[in-house]
Image (cartoon, rainbow, N blue to C red):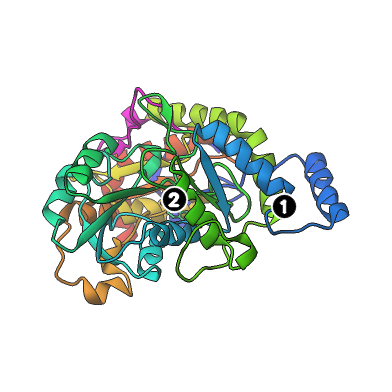
Amino acid sequence: MRLKSLPAELAVFGGAPAFPQELPVGQLNVPDWDVFTDMFSDILERGYYTNNGPLVRQLEFELQRILNVRHAICVTNCTIALMIAARALDLRGEVIVPAFTFPGTVQALAWAGAIPVFADVDPRTHALTSDTVHPCLSDRTTAVLGVHLWGRACDPDRLGALCDSHGLKLFYDAAHAFACTHRGRPIGSLGAFEAFSFHATKIVSGAEGGCLTTNDDELANRARTLRNFHSSQTFAKVGPRINGKMSEAQAGMALLSLRNLDANIAHNRDIDAIYRARSIDWPGLRLYRHAPEEQNNYQYAVIEVLPGCRIDRDSLVELLRAENVLARRYFYPGLHRVVPFSEQYLHVSLPVTDALAKSCLQIPLGPLVDEDAASQISDLIAFACAHGDAILERMRA
Ligand SMILES: *Cc1c(COP(=O)(O)O)cnc(C)c1O
């Protein structure tokens, strides 16, 4: 693409899109074709497709090593992992959660029979903190479910202390946080449980998939029992069970994905560095800052449109999408404004969540974005900021 020099050249006004191919958020990391076909012919030859097969066991073993945790329990997806965690912890009453998260986080709690109570988030980290959780405590609170949003640990030290002092359980949605650290140690054992996602759009992909991690042997036994409805797989006394087993196909995909993990993170980190360096030319926008002293997987490039920016969030998303840069509002809106929660939670006031839902967008990052594309996307954003007034006027016309 040649840098557009007039608003009229933008695709949103009929110009040629900057990219011939769509660049989505949450791009697929594809395994090498040869190893993929070998892996799948092995599965077919063994004729062992599911029920805690050899690849699931190997994956669990590798996850325990990488995440430095006693138990990794692979399941169908992260949502089922959270449902199983809530049941294994025997949660009743109210569980405090953020509304600035993926719907699965809270749907899982509701399925498990807990009552979600939405707490606001911190404007800098976008996540729960002990300060935002504290006002939501009641005598019905039994637990806190934090989300390690954008791969940053969700205030584990202070939140852990708050939960300990109130006798509450603390567990985490770690769907964003594979290969991310807290105080230099891998995220995965900060809560009673942590739930990871291996959905296709995550840094480690099994197409679908997830796992629960814990250092607690008794909780691990309960989770392993809950995941499989067969009585021959009983390791602890639990209530009604579910089918949350991971298939060999998922485990095979995830194992291949782990082989490429370092390279995929390194690529993301390079692209993130370009966006970061170029973001000085984006007046009125703020690129989310990962914790500087920790490792991140750089799977998310999140921009906040600040008050006073010459272009508003929705117009910026529209402009980029026309160029085939499939930026997304994410998360939008907060879950307290989404069915089925919106009906019950009309009264809750979450000003920071609402402000973030109105101001955040994600820009693409992943294998389809090379350094050149990152640079061109940065140019487009800089152009939109510089010419925001003229662009908005023309968009309205
Ligand atoms: C992707 C995601 C989930 C859901 O994971 P699945 O494996 O698709 O069930 C839950 N929470 C967050 C924060 C996510 O990003």
Residue type at the position of mark 1 = Gly
SS at mark 1 in the image: loop
In the rendering, at what x and y percent does residue 265 appear?
Answer: 54, 31
Vertical relation: 232 (above or below) 66: below
> Which residue lies under the disc numbered 2?
219
Tell me which residue sits at (26%, 72%) in the image: 342
| Above or below, 2 relative to 135 | above
Q: The C terminus lies in which quarter of the figure?
A: bottom left
x, y (%) of residue 117? Answer: 23, 62
- 392 with respect to 180 (left or right): left
From the image, tell me which residue sits under label 1: 53
Quick one: SS at disc 2? helix
Which residue is located at x 53 percent, y 47 percent? 202
Query: Which is in the foreground here, disc 1 or disc 2?
Result: 2
Instruction: Name which quarter of the figure residue 110 lies in.
Output: bottom left
- Please report whichever mark, 1 or 2, sits nearer to the chain's N-terminal start: 1
- When asked about the image quadrant of residue 333, the answer is bottom left
Residues shaded magenta: 279-296
In the picture provided, is 274 more to the left or to the right than 66?
A: left
